[in-house]
């Protein structure tokens, strides 16, 4: 018998929900499905920027990554 470490990953799709406040370039995502992934295929990390002035704990996820992110 062999055992393998796997990771459960949530996959998202663009939501049909439209916020009342106009925000150019804003996209809302909803969970769509799940997949099991081997850890060797996962980049572990993201750049989360706090939303200042918000009463809720909200973050912008930065999708711009350069080589410094992996140091």
Image (cartoon, rainbow, N blue to C red):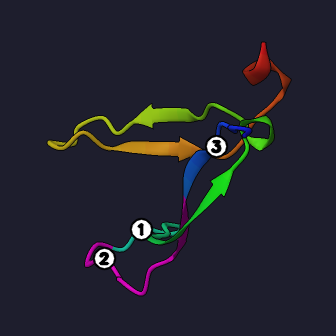
Q: Residue furthest front?
A: 1
Among all residues in the image, which is located at the extreme left? 55
Farthest bottom residue in view: 16
Q: Are marks 1 and 2 in contact (CB under 8 Å)?
A: yes
Compute the Cα span from label 3 to label 1: 37 Å
Q: Position of residue 51 (x, y in %)?
A: 34, 39
Q: Residues within 10 Å of mark 1 (few under 14, many from 20)?
A: few
Residue hosting label 1: 23
3 or 22: which is nearer to us?
3
Point out the stretch of residues depicted in magenta. 10-21
Residue drawn at the location 49% of the way across and 34% of the way down: 48
Vertical order, 66 against 2 (above or below): above
Marks 1/2: CA–CA distance:
8 Å
Q: Nearer the viewer, residue 24 or 64?
A: 64
Q: Is residue 11 magenta?
A: yes
Residue at the spot 49% in from the left edge and 69% down from the top edge: 27
In the picture, measured across the screen, residue 52 lies left or right of residue 42, that is: left
Residue displayed at 46% across by 34% down: 49
Mark 2, Cα crowd under 10 Å, few <14 / some 14-19 / many 20+, is few
For discs 3 and 1, the disc positioned in front in the rendered view? 3
Find numbered disc 3 in the image and state the secondary structure of the residue it sits on: loop
Question: Could you tell me which secondary element the residue under label 1 belongs to?
Answer: loop
Is mark 2 in CB contact (under 8 Å) with mark 3? Answer: no
Q: Which residue is mark 3?
A: 6
Residue corresponding to mark 2:
19
| In this view, 5 is above or below 70 | below
Q: Quadrant of the N terminus?
A: top right
Q: Residue 2: x percent and y percent?
A: 74, 38
Closer to viewer: mark 2 or mark 3: 3
Callout in the foreground (1, 2): 2
In which image quadrant can residue 31 be found?
Answer: bottom left
Question: Would residue 1 be counted in the magenta stretch?
Answer: no
């Amino acid at each position: 018998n062999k055992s393998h470490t796997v990771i459960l990953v949530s996959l998202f799709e663009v939501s049909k929900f439209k916020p009342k406040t106009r925000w150019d370039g804003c996209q809302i995502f909803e969970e769509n499905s799940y997949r099991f992934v081997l850890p060797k295929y996962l980049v572990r990390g993201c750049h989360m920027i706090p939303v200042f002035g918000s009463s809720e704990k909200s973050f912008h996820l930065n999708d711009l990554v350069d080589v410094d992110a992996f140091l």
